[in-house]
Amino acid sequence: MIIFAILVTGFSGLVAQILLLRELLVSYLGNELTLGIILADWLIGEALGVFIIGKLIDRIRNKAAVFTILQIGFSLALPSCLYLARTYKAMIGVPAGEAVSLAFIFYSSFFIILPVAFCHAGLFSCGCKLLSSNRSGTKETPAGSIAKIYALETSGTIIGGITLTYVLLSRFDPFQIAFVVSAASLLVNLPFLNLPSAKIKILRYLNLSLAGVFIYLSISGSSAYIQNMSVKRQFASAELLDYRSSPYGNITVIRKEGQLTFFYNGLPIITSPFPDVTFSEEFGNLPLLFQQDPKKVLIMGGGVGGIIYEILKYPVERIDYIELDPMVIAMLRKYPTAPIKMELSDKRVNIINTDGRVFLHNTARKYDLILIGSSDPRELSTNRFFTSDFFSLAKEKLHRAGILSFCLPGSLTYLSSELKNLNAGILNAAKENFAYVRVLPGDYNMFFASASGEIMDITAATLSSRINALNIKTNLLLPAYLDYRLNNQWSEWFYRSMAGSTKIINKDEKPFAVFEALILWNKQFSGKFSRILNYLSGLNLKMALALILVIAFPVFLLTFLRRGKETTLNITYSITTTGFFGMLISLIIMFMFQVRYGCLYRDIGMLTSLFMAGSAIASILALRLLGNKDTGIAIDLLVRVEAVIIVFTIITACLTSLLGYGNFSYLALLVLSFLAGSLVGLEFPLAGKIYTTQRKEVGETSGTLYFADLIGGCLAGDLGGVLLLQVEGITNTCLVLALLKSSSLTALIFYKNTTKKTL
């Protein structure tokens, strides 16, 4: 039964992680950087659980009771923490839709996640000890039990990821899923609770009672009540009209004082019937007035609720509107206001539910005008429309006199260094691809990019003349306002203020603008933390190499001083760097996936499952390869795996610029995720074999190695997700990773040579 229990543990752990991750991303208005922080917090919680329980379990007589208590703790914590993840901001008085700092995200997500992650990881150490000496009297070798538990738990996560992604999320609400998982986790405990001990009987009754409660909650409709109650608490200041989750994101509709607001993943994206009139009129009119008689217009998101309404005033023949998530359009049709109804019903409007970059890559159509609906590139999914790579693609789809137009945060009083660099990185990218780029400074800066110089000659008088000729009705774009908006003094002030700004070009591979937007965002909450981020932005390969040498030097020194004696420091260091590799390479693959397809929210479960599938299969393979072979063979294999990891990392860096947008690239990223997991999975059993020959107890061994693995992953989540990928880009991050693994490879070779006489 322990085998089935561990499978369920792996299943429930993955489901819990993804459920909490999705809720926290929505609550934090999160991007891919937030993802790294939340995953790091999960790993810290797991590291604490596996280490503490691993240290204690060898000394505890009734290990089955500990396993049961941990399962009970996990089952109670999951729905409770899920509720807290959704409502904690309301509890402390932070309104829905209001951002919080990275520091706040780090410590709040840690305390929300900790109870679930701690109990789940503790089950790993406890399961290893139960399997190494089960009740039937059969004995697993210490290394064999660790490897088997690792493989079983990982197999459970594969089943959990696939089931959650393709079955559960589309049919059940998060609380219903949580209650089912909690009930299943409790039911697998029952075979361990057949002893006559009075304490065991109490545990059995408690376990069975709680399982019954969770089953009732999952089938009685109570989960729907809790779901609605939590959402109402989340949006306490307004009337909740609807709350839905799609494969791409979470959509909420609220009404306050007659105004509808549509939230997508926690961010307000549409307000109706009274939108931001200034932005809608400017962005919905000026690009069309800059273009002489535009007929075909492409809008990349953010068009419904005002922009399309303005564009329809012109004699355009076709408006292609890209909206990735069909649920957004469905909700707009369900709660229409007069402007939205007009926008969606006009025959000239062609709604296309796909990713904007994939559409642009595949379409043969050329446009007079391309508008980028988002104006805040603080996440990869939006930044990918502000890179040199995208601008190059957009240029191919424009007629010669066509215009690409977008907006960025701005100011007419003061441009901070972050605001300057954010605008400069994207302006540099536009200038790299378009011969002419014009900026209209304001509270948001409006950019016009074209292969034709006509945009540079447009004056306020030209725009007024075209408005009159087309008989366009506007409330804002009057001659006096246009004279003010297009006054040359603002452009001159803007370029003077931009002096000394960055020369870096915002690219897919190196999303400089995301990091600058991150600093700008955090400056609202903590100037000190933003200064730290600014300082860290100077990180380079030389500094990374120096840091790796500083970290690795004590390992080499202690190995040399203890040569000929038993030591496991090098093995622990290797597993720590492998944990770092596993997390960071996963983030790199997610990064590449998001840049190309923009739907990580939908496919994160599949990517995680494939990583874990590779890990499980490789663990079983390593276990069979080892058999009863001596420790020397395990060390040789571990050295070879380390070398393969370095090669794999370099190949991943090379693939960055080669992958496109088609099915082959999609499949290639899935395969990369599987192979990365395989390399991680190979190392754990090998390290366990070496470690247990040093006469370490099973619980201590599993706890120490898993702790090292998780700590490495935690560091990668924080440093890699927030810093390395944004500052150094994918290629340099892969090089840093290769250098780090080279240090652990060297440490292993050194360990092998200095201890070969004792093997």
Image (cartoon, rainbow, N blue to C red):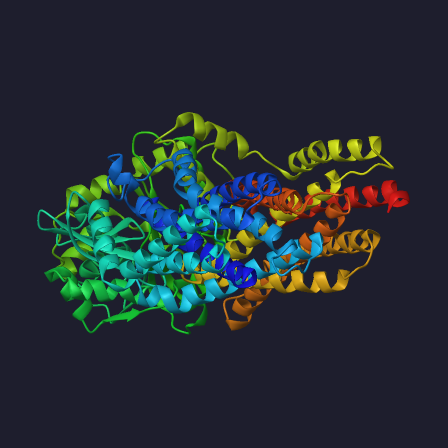
The reply to whether residue 659 is visible in this rendering is no
Question: Which of the 4 image quarters holds residue 343?
Answer: bottom left
Would you say 361 lies left or right of 138 here?
A: left
Residue occupying image coordinates x 52% and y 44%: 46
- Place of residue 448 in the rendered image (x, y in percent of width and height, measured from the top left): 35, 52
* Quadrant, the N terminus: bottom right
* Viewer-proximal residue among 237 and 168: 168
Would you say 515 lies left or right of 283 here?
A: right
- Place of residue 738 in the rendered image (x, y in percent of width and height, measured from the top left): 69, 48
- Place of residue 217 in the rendered image (x, y in percent of width and height, measured from the top left): 27, 58
Residue occupying image coordinates x 51% and y 58%: 10
User: Taking 357 as reference, is 716 above or below it?
Assistant: above
Would you say 241 lies left or right of 536 here?
A: left
In the image, farthest residue toward the right = 757
The reply to whether residue 724 is visible in this rendering is yes
* Viewer-proximal residue among 729 and 155: 155
Q: How many marks?
A: 0
- Place of residue 454 in the rendered image (x, y in percent of width and height, measured from the top left): 35, 55
Residue occupying image coordinates x 78% and y 35%: 556
In the image, farthest residue toward the left = 258
* Viewer-proximal residue among 29 and 483: 29
* Viewer-proximal residue among 386 and 52: 52
Residue occupying image coordinates x 56% and y 38%: 52
